[in-house]
Amino acid sequence: MGRVRFAFVVLRRAKRAEHRSVGRRGRALTRLSAPGVTLLTSPGMTSNTSPAIELRGAGKAFRTPSGALHTAVRDLDLTVERGEFVAVVGPTGCGKSTTLTLVSGLEEPTEGEVLVGGEPVHGIGGDVGFVFQQDAVFPWRTVLSNVMAGPRFRGVPKTEARERARDWLARVGLSAFEDRYPHQLSGGQRKRVALAATFVNDPKILLMDEPFSALDVQTRALMSDQLLDLWAGTGSSVVFVTHDLEESIALADKVVVMTAGPATVKEVFTIDLPRPRKVEEVRLEPRFLEIYREIWSSLGEEVRITRERGAGHAA
Amino acid sequence: MPPESVSLPAAGTLAKPTDAAERSRTRARAVRRRVLTVNGTRLLVLVVFLGVWEWFSRTGVIDPFNFSMPSQIWDQITTWIMHGTAQGSLGEQVWTTLQEAVYGWVIGVATGVLLGIALGRVRFLADVFGPYVKVLNAMPRIVLAPIFLIWFGLGPASKVASAVVLVFFPVFFNAFQGAREVDRNLVSNARILGASNRKVTFQVVIPSATSWIFTSLHVSFGFALIGAIVGEYIGATKGLGLMVSTAQGTFNSAGVYAAMVILAVVALIAEGLLTFLEKRLFRWKPADPGAR
């Protein structure tokens, strides 16, 4: 995958730029010097060039069983460009996952707007893929049948669905396992089935909710590399939620730091590490550490706040 | 033999493989011995139980008129098999009861699963019908058997009806629970992958509710038999329940026991068939339920 992946479109309305500039405080690590970057600042927006995902002042409040109103996220402003890989990091339980459910259409925002491809989200769109934290493969279907599920749900004829599923199974290296049931696979293999089942639908928007958090460290690095490989061919936009800062820097073009709950965007960092990356190698580079330190100084504060609250709650 | 093939790579150390082979042979012997002991003890318990019963009856410790004895029960069964019962051949009686039970079971299971999943999936229906279902469930439904006899007459229909009401509720509640407890992740995943509501119901909710439903199928076949037998006992022209009631009417306690034995055998065979079916259907499940 020699292709440079981050031809990345920056389209920002003046108003929104101003709105966010407070949060950014000029800390964004600019990547203008990186080779292959196209910077488009054309104000003329057509639906073709509108960002892949846009959240405008989006918020979500839930009713708790006791009847109280719990705000999960508030005043979310976030733009994900087409083909961009955005990682969202934040303290545990701050509402990162809620952000994803808003974009996916599984939940509707109680405030503000969520746009996908320039259109407001109403229900689940056809262009969205979602990889869940827990196993979400169907245990009663074989591996092949699991990967076929998406196309079959969407009315693709059986033979074509099988062909596409076999293709993606080959790409994740599970061709030999197509007749197995999920319980006969390891955790990493099940995750690969989930990835294939998501990618087989050719999603333009790929949402990932701590997908590798249940895996051991070695498998996780392997899966991250595999994800980058798979993604490189698709040109889809990714929102990757994680609590692992290293993982987020290694994978993403842009790291979004969330505040302690109720969460909102605190700062956005641009990652100027060149692609293609190898996760295990990139984390040894001096630039990686520099970025890590910078983001951690922002994230660490929120983690501390969350921890103190937790302690106060326990006392 | 497998131990030999294991020993091949370790040609240098001759003592070890024979040790290993010896050990695995000892282990196999121990397993066989255990199986024998368990089965032997089982048989012993049965023999002692029947023996004591026979002995007490013969020596008059218990009244043979009330309690009968194994030899008489055996005689009764052989008489039924050889010469038929008062209502016709034994096979015909068993077949009648079984037919009623199976019809009742199939209808009860079908309606139970259908309504259970419908109410589990559609909140509105659950809210409307919830209280009624609770009221009906609280009622001892076996008292409906006489009413069914009045409605449907002495024929099999009244027995099928009482089997249906007994089968319906456990199946319904399990299907309902199963539909409610579907992993939310699986449903979200299916919806994201593009499944319509109908497809979510048929391809996610129903498969994941099947293990709930199947646990109720075992219990409910027993209920179907109870429904059929009680229906026959109250009034019928054929069937095992009628045999019990005739035996009781003629103070033939051996006949009551004999009918019970036949019923037990029938129920066991049905249970075995269900277990076999379940194993075929749940190939996707881990073999050992405690493994995960």
Image (cartoon, rainbow, N blue to C red):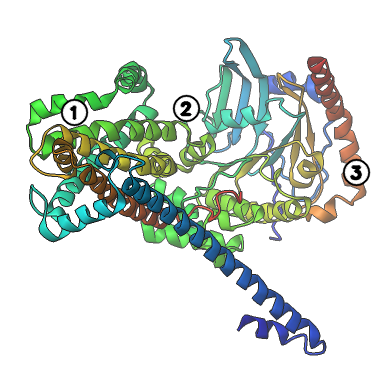
**Above or below: residue B256 compared with residue A165:** above
Q: Are both tags, 1 and 3, on one chain?
A: no
The chain under label 3 reads: A
Whether residue A247 is visible to the viewer of this picture, yes or no, is yes
In-front residue for pair A296/B279: B279
**Above or below: residue B106 compared with residue B9:** above
Q: Residue at x 52, y 49 (%)?
A: A202
Residue that numbered label 2 is attached to? A122
In-front residue for pair A63/A102: A63
Q: Residue at x 83, y 23 (%)?
A: A307
> What is the crowding at mark 2: few (fewer than 14 residues within 10 Å), some, or many (at least 20)?
some
Q: Are both tags, 1 and 2, on one chain?
A: no
Q: Indicate the position of residue A230 as horizontal and vertical percent values.
A: 63, 55
Whole-number angstrom distance, CA of label 1 to CA of label 2: 53 Å
Residue B145: image tag: 1
Residue that numbered label 3 is attached to? A289
> What is the crowding at mark 3: few (fewer than 14 residues within 10 Å), some, or many (at least 20)?
some
Q: Earlier in the sequence, mark 2 or mark 3?
A: 2
Q: Secondary structure at mark 3?
A: helix
Q: Nearer the viewer, mark 1 or mark 2?
A: 1
Q: Secondary structure at mark 1?
A: helix
Under mark 2, the amino acid is His
**Is B220 left, or right, of A139 in this rendering?**
left
Q: Residue at x 90, y 43 (%)?
A: A289
Q: Indicate the position of residue A128 as horizontal and vertical percent values.
A: 53, 40
Residue found at the very far top of the displayed protein: A68
